[in-house]
Amino acid sequence: MKKHTIILALFLLTGTLSYGQPDEGNPGSSPAPFGFVELLVAAGAALGGKKIYDAKKKSEN
């Protein structure tokens, strides 16, 4: 379980660090909106976390 936690933390850190907006750009440009794909990724991560939690809980019984 510890290995999964470390891998998940690295994955989330890498994703947040690589999703930066450039410093120099058009003066009137706005940052990218939070789109539907990001919501699907978050839902998939939540579902995967729940499945891991349930499997761990089941194996303890």
Image (cartoon, helix red, strand yellow):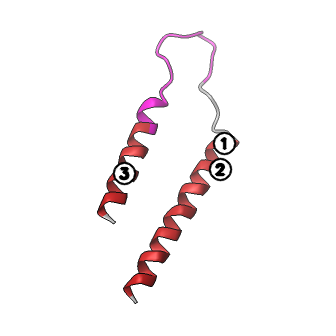
Q: Mark 1 points at which residue?
A: 37
* Residue depicted at x 66% and y 42%: 37
Q: Closer to the observer: label 3 or label 1?
A: 3
Q: Is residue 34 left or right of residue 54?
A: right
Image mark for residue 7: 3
**Disc 3 or disc 2, which is closer to the eye?**
3
> What SS does tag 3 mark?
helix
Q: Label 3 neighbourhood size at 10 Å, few (<14), some (14-19), many (20+)?
A: few
Foreground pick, 10 / 16: 10
Q: Label 1 crowding class (10 Å Cα cut-off): few <14, some 14-19, many 20+?
A: few
Name the quarter where the C terminus is drawn. bottom left
Residue identified by numbered label 2 = 40
In three-dimensional space, the C-alpha distance between marks 3 and 2, rounded to whole angstroms, equals 20 Å
Which stretch did the figure color magenta? 15-30
Q: Distance between the residues labelled 3 and 1?
A: 22 Å
Place of residue 46 in the rendered image (x, y in percent of width and height, measured from the top left): 54, 60
Residue type at tag 1: Val
Callout 2 secondary element? helix
Query: Whole-percent x and y of residue 55?
Result: 47, 76
**Looking at the image, do the residues carrying marks 2 and 1 touch, with CB atoms under 8 Å apart?**
yes
Q: Which residue is drawn at 41% across and 33% down?
A: 17
Q: Is residue 18 magenta?
A: yes
Which residue: 46% across, 15% down?
23
Q: Is residue 20 above or below residue 26?
A: below
Residue 10 drawn at (x, y percent):
36, 45
Which quarter of the figure is the N terminus placed in?
Answer: bottom left
Side of 23 where 27 appears, left or right: right
Left or right for 7, reference 33: left
Taking 38 as reference, is 18 above or below it?
Answer: above
